[in-house]
Amino acid sequence: MSYTAATVQLLDIEGKLVTSDATAEYLPYIEKLSDDQLREFHRQMVVIRRFDIDAANLQRQGQLAMWIPSLGQEAAQVGSGLAARPQDHIFPSYREHVIARIRGVDPMRIIEMLRGLSHGGWDPKEHNNFHLYTLVLGSQTLHAAGYAMGIQLDGATATGNPETDEAVIVYFGDGSSSQGDVNEALVFAASYQAPLVFFLQNNHWAISVPVTRQSRTPLYLRPGGFGIPGIQIDGNDVLASYAVTTANLDRARSGGGPQFIEALTYRMGAHTTSDDPTKYRDNEELDFWTKADAITRYEKFLRSRGAGDDFFAEIEAEAADLTADIRRRTIALGVPEPSQMFEYVYSEPHALMDAQREWLANYEASFEGGEA
Amino acid sequence: MSVENLSMAKALNQGLRQALLADPKVLLMGEDIGPLGGVFRVTEGLHAEFGDNRVLDTPLAESGIVGTAIGLAMRGYRPVCEIQFDGFIFPAFDQITTQLAKLTSRHHGSLTMPVVIRVPYGGHIGAVEHHQESPEAYFAHTPGLRVVSPSNPHDAYWMIQEAIQSNDPVIFFEPKSRYWPKGDVDTSASGFPLHSTRVVRPGTEVTLVGYGPMVSMLLQAAEIAESEGTSVEVIDLRSISPIDYDPIVASVQKTGRLVVAQEAPGFVSVGSEIAATVTERAFYSLEAPVLRVAGFDTPFPPAKLETAYLPDADRILEAVDRAMAY
């Protein structure tokens, strides 16, 4: 699959704005942006790509158990992530590193998960409503639907004030789209008309299985059967991702019910560092998506609007600084106390946890000063 | 003291009503729980009293019910889900075990998951496949969940309210065969915490432990044993996870014999767990091995065979006799 006649693209692969009937609805969202805001898209994409590449290196160097690359999907994520308002809630899958960063999650929290130190650990309430990663595919779409139902029950949406009305955006992929939970989430969201935007990143591969095995119909058409409008965008076009997501979130927050965006993008690297994509996909496809790269075209766009070498050098320096800082902090990470295993299993006292915590402490103490 | 004579179904209904009155964040959600009042009528009248925003008839999708309940709990609600029948909980098994049970831990304690899942369970109702099962062991085996089952209307009235007040997820198993017999409910005071076993009938020679639908069977067996000259103590577990062991161990230290009974298959079951732990904690008091009385390790059979499958007073007495013979 590649772009179709239905794909909304605001910035073509040469970095030129597309003016057509199809883009007329969305270009005003871009025209409203200042140069600084337009440059912020680039900064986020470039910095996260550098971080992402170096995190994969950290895995190869034995510092991480695994890495989950987001390489190639920066535009889909940055555009939609910056489209969410502060009051919105974001339910990620597990590859949305840049959205985590945009919402104030220190990338070290993700590094810690993939080094085997935690299963999550940030508090969404203190990180601009960015919820935890979910590794079981599609489960988070139901949590997002329930959360959006709660917003509605609270009367915190569709009051007519876009500055405070809340909405939810949930991320998932082409593989997840086959999961029962995703389909149930579409049913629940539609039935209760919950303020929820489904954001499907179609990166074309579920590990080694192509999207054609997941669906024989373009995925943006699938929500139609649930009574939810669907739209397909060029996911490597950060402006389309931003504008269309903004429009969809605003529709959801103003009482328009759930919305669905399919962002066509490409997983340029492996599924995770455990994977070898050369075994199952060909170079022709990779070439197509290399030419469609988000950052290359966006740099051309910014240069056409006057951004100079200084700006790009500054971003490169920021990316290098972040990467060096993450590397330094990763290598310095310790290991949590084993007793932490028992701490948060229940939120209230629990006899079995107390007994096992005590047993482990005594067992470990029994070796102190001994020959073990 | 204010005592009413209620069926367990009505006691649960009144307990749910109290919870809805006490806290505007409490929501009921499930299939057919609205105007119909649930297939067992446990929520009868509540939709009319509290409306669409408190009593939600959901789409017919169990994973969807539990998954959206998780999202609602993240928002600050306290959802109480009804799963229509025991055998229908499995479409929600993934959301319960991989999400609901782990989210507090995954958030390092910053998120609580006050979700109650009510599950009518057990046999003796002559129903079709998937409508008579006892899946409690799956959930007791899952860290992060609390699992309880009342055996009588008074306990049901209070336990459902305590479960809803818990900040941890609670799987609340309701014994279908006990929905209709009436009992006294003291609506002024519970008299016990959620996770506490209760000595229902004192005795000196054999301890019988069970929960939910088995407790009335154990009491029947105890009466027959008494008439035959054996003094039997009966303990109602009430909480399957965690288990309040101290009263059980104290009882076994007195009687020296323990029989554990359940409708669920015996292999890798709640009864097995109790047998192992009591053996560790009261080994020197035991006069006989701990014996289990359980459903067979087969699928729950067609209804006309259920009396052969389910433990009854006679099978409990057979185990009492074996324990006494050591």
Image (cartoon, rainbow, N blue to C red):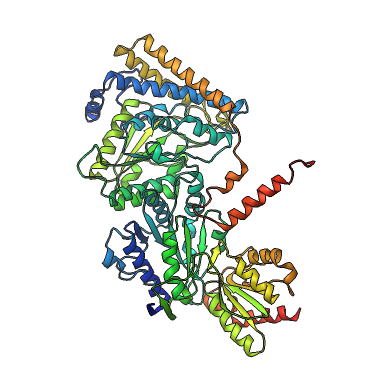
User: Is residue B59 shown above or below A307?
Assistant: below
Q: Is residue A259 left or right of residue A370?
A: left
In this rendering, position of residue B7 left or right of residue A272: left
Residue A173 makes an appearance in the image: no
Give the quarter of the image for residue A198. Answer: top left
The image shows residue B236, relative to residue A143, as above or below, that is: below
Identify the residue at the far left of this view.
Answer: A160
> Is residue A112 visible from the viewing direction of this image?
yes
Quarter holding residue B40: bottom left
Q: Residue at x 41, y 76 (%)?
A: B186
Q: Position of residue A49 (x, y in %)?
A: 46, 23
From what the image shows, is residue A372 above or below residue A154?
above
Residue B305, image x, y percentages: 56, 78
Which quadrant, please, contains the N terminus of chain A? top left
**Residue B256, percent across and down?**
71, 75
Residue A229 in which image quadrant: top left
